[in-house]
């Protein structure tokens, strides 16, 4: 097959073409896979265990370590969102607890960190807790709960 590369059809500039050979099928070879060998210096891999890290204040609205694994992502999303944005929901399928976070104020600087007040709710099978708190963003981008006001509990519907 031949394609026009440059030039025009007028006599002032000759037309130059180029050819592209037809595609050939790639060779098919069997694929073999084997696990990588362990480095000689390491006989067995070390075992590391970790527990979920609770933030100060997370327990004050009834969050278990398992709940906090689901809730902390929602807190971060809520605090980086618009003040008039919708609440950011979370739910823990293991405990059945669920809740939401929403910002309560604009960002403010505090001790060199950006902080923001928030409203939080947690709903369990027996009650609903609502709190107001403040969280500050660490240099690494994580939001740490700095303070929490006492929750108000109401019976769940």
Image (cartoon, rainbow, N blue to C red):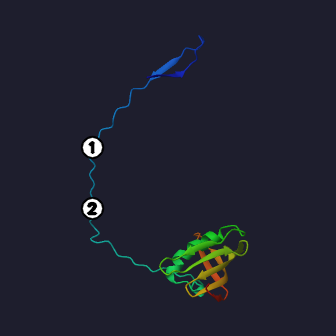
Decide which of 98, 133 is in the foreground and name it: 98
User: Residue 76, located in which quarter of the rendered image?
Assistant: bottom right
Left or right of 78 in this view: 93: left
The residue carrying pointer 1 sits among few (fewer than 14), some (14 to 19) or many (20 or more) residues within 10 Å by Cα, namely: few
- Real-space Cα distance between discs 1 and 2? 24 Å
Q: Residue at x 64, y 71 (%)?
A: 78
Decide which of 32, 12 is in the foreground and name it: 32
- Image quadrant holding the N terminus, namely top left
Query: Which residue sits furthest front?
Result: 157
- Identify the residue position indicated by label 2 in the image: 37
Tell me residue 56's x, y (percent).
58, 84
Q: Is residue 1 above or below residue 37?
A: above
Residue 142 in sight: no
Q: Is residue 29 above or below residue 157?
A: above
Tell me residue 119's x, y (percent).
67, 79
Residue 76 in sight: yes
Nearer to us: label 1 or label 2:
1
Decide which of 40, 144 is in the foreground and name it: 144
- Image quadrant holding the C terminus, namely bottom right
The number of callouts visible is 2
Q: Do callouts 1 and 2 mark residues in contact (Cβ within 8 Å)?
A: no
Tell me residue 80's x, y (percent).
65, 68
The residue carrying pointer 2 sits among few (fewer than 14), some (14 to 19) or many (20 or more) residues within 10 Å by Cα, namely: few
Tell me residue 49's x, y (percent).
40, 78
> For residue 111, which numbered disc appears in the image?
none
* Badge 2 element: loop
Decide which of 13, 41 is in the foreground and name it: 13
* Badge 1 element: loop
Specify which label sits upstream in the sequence, 1 or 2: 1
> For residue 29, which numbered disc appears in the image?
1
Q: Residue at x 33, y 37 (%)?
A: 26
Left or right of 68 in this view: 130: right
């Amino acid at each position: 097959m031949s394609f026009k590369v440059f030039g025009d059809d007028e006599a002032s500039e000759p037309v130059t073409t180029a050819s592209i050979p037809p595609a050939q099928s790639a060779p098919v070879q069997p694929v073999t896979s084997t696990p990588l060998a362990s480095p000689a210096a390491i006989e067995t891999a070390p075992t590391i265990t970790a527990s979920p890290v609770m933030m100060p204040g997370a327990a004050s609205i009834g969050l278990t370590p398992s709940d906090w694994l689901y809730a902390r992502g929602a807190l971060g999303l809520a605090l980086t969102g618009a003040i008039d944005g919708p609440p950011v929901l979370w739910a823990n399928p293991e405990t059945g607890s669920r809740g939401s976070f929403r910002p309560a104020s604009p960002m403010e600087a505090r001790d060199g960190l950006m902080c923001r007040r928030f409203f939080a709710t947690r709903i369990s099978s027996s009650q609903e807790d609502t709190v107001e708190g403040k969280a500050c963003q660490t240099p690494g981008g994580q939001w740490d709960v700095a303070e929490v006001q006492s929750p108000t509990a109401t019976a769940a519907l």
